[in-house]
Image (cartoon, rainbow, N blue to C red):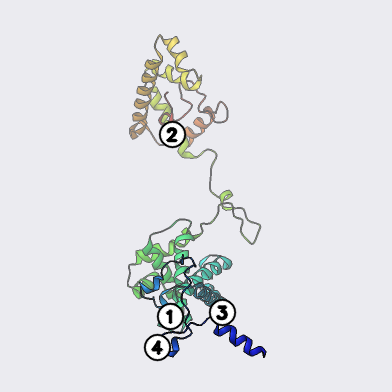
């Protein structure tokens, strides 16, 4: 028997002859195997629920494409961010810091860009980057932060002043700037002075030309100012009007530096009584010093006599003359 006939005989041996009237296309169907186990697969859910549109289901591929698109935008427009940051370089900030802020604004613009609403990314990104730079300069660059309206007015002056100078051929005055911007002259002066709040000058800074002292060493000072002599003269006169017991109390407390407990033992009083008496005497002495009738103008002779008789007991101590306190009574801690 040829080989193909053997194959054909094996195939037809399993085919059952159907009754008459059955369509011939069903002659190759086999009955289900009753010995097979029932299928454990869950029913098809797609038959119960309509299929969702393909665009409504996010895919990982779409997310990667969007990320790649944003990365390309950022890398292609780094020059735009740096050019916008260069406009704010004269505001007293480092160029590198401004570039970093501009890069953040560029990333923010790339994430929010929708190509379906427009095809010009630079036109969309420029306001976003500029807004980030302005927000950074407004919130982070001030050492002493002025009000918002003063900051905005200072920015307007920074832009308008060169234009007016070119138009007038000279530097514009405060009134001319105020008239051009439609604000008051006082507001313009306040905005101009606000520049010192951006970066205050250091008292220890040395001038760049050299040969000069720092500002802190050039401040005017005097070893024995005339005002100090006048205060001492008034204090001497006010002390003479106190009772002898009160003068003795002040002398032993502030010149001899006796404690309130020691004074209480000496005077036969408690520490609380000594404290209250000292407070009363100091308030009385302060009122006398505030009364201008007790102080006469200090003449040159009086100044010489005061400076010769009033010598500090040691550095930081007050007067050494008997009956005179060593410190300003208004600053004495009575406890």
Tell me residue 173's x, y (percent): 41, 71
Image vertical order of residue 265 relative to residue 102, above or below = above
Per the model, the C-alpha gap separating discs 1 and 4 is 114 Å
Pointer 4 residue: 20
Q: Earlier in the sequence, mark 3 or mark 4?
A: 4
Residue 245 location, quadrant: top left
* Residue at the spot 38% in from the left edge and 63% down from the top edge: 150
Quadrant in which the C terminus is drawn: top left
- Circles 1 and 3: CB distance less than 8 Å? no
Question: Is residue 90 among the parts visible in the rendering?
Answer: no
Per the model, the C-alpha gap separating discs 2 and 1 is 55 Å
Per the model, the C-alpha gap separating discs 3 and 4 is 78 Å
Label 1: element kind: helix
Image mark for residue 76: 3
Depth check, mark 2 against mark 1: the one in front is: 1
Label 2: element kind: helix
Per the model, the C-alpha gap separating discs 1 and 3 is 42 Å
Pointer 1 residue: 168
* Residue at the spot 62% in from the left edge and 86% down from the top edge: 7
Image mark for residue 231: 2
């Amino acid at each position: 028997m040829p080989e193909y006939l053997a194959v054909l005989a094996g195939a037809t041996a399993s085919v059952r002859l159907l009754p008459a009237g059955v369509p011939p296309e069903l002659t190759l169907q086999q009955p289900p195997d009753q010995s097979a186990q029932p299928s454990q697969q869950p029913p098809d859910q797609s038959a119960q629920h309509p299929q969702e549109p393909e665009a409504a289901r996010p895919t990982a591929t779409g997310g990667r494409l969007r990320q790649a698109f944003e990365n390309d935008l950022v890398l292609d427009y780094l020059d735009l961010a740096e050019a916008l940051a260069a406009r704010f370089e004269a505001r007293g900030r480092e160029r590198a810091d401004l570039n970093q802020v501009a890069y953040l604004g560029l990333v923010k613009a790339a994430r929010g860009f929708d190509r379906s609403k427009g095809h010009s990314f630079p036109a969309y990104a420029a306001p976003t980057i500029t807004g980030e730079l302005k927000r950074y300069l407004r919130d982070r660059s001030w050492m002493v932060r002025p009000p918002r309206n003063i900051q905005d007015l200072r920015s307007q002056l920074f832009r308008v002043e060169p234009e007016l100078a070119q138009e007038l051929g000279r530097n514009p005055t405060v009134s001319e700037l105020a008239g051009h911007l439609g604000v008051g002259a006082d507001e313009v002066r306040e905005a101009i002075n606000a520049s010192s709040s951006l970066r205050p000058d250091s008292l220890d800074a040395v001038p760049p030309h050299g040969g000069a002292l720092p500002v802190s060493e050039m401040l005017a000072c005097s070893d024995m100012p005339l005002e100090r002599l006048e205060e001492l003269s008034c204090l001497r006169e006010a002390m003479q009007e106190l009772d002898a017991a009160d003068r003795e109390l002040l002398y032993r407390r502030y010149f001899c530096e006796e404690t309130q407990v020691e004074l209480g033992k000496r005077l036969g009083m408690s520490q609380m009584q000594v404290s209250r008496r000292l407070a009363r005497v100091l308030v009385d002495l302060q009122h006398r010093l505030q009364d201008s009738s007790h102080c006469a103008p200090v003449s040159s002779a009086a100044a010489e006599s005061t400076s010769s008789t009033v010598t500090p007991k040691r550095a930081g101590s007050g007067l050494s003359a008997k009956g005179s306190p060593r410190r300003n009574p208004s600053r004495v801690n009575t406890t």
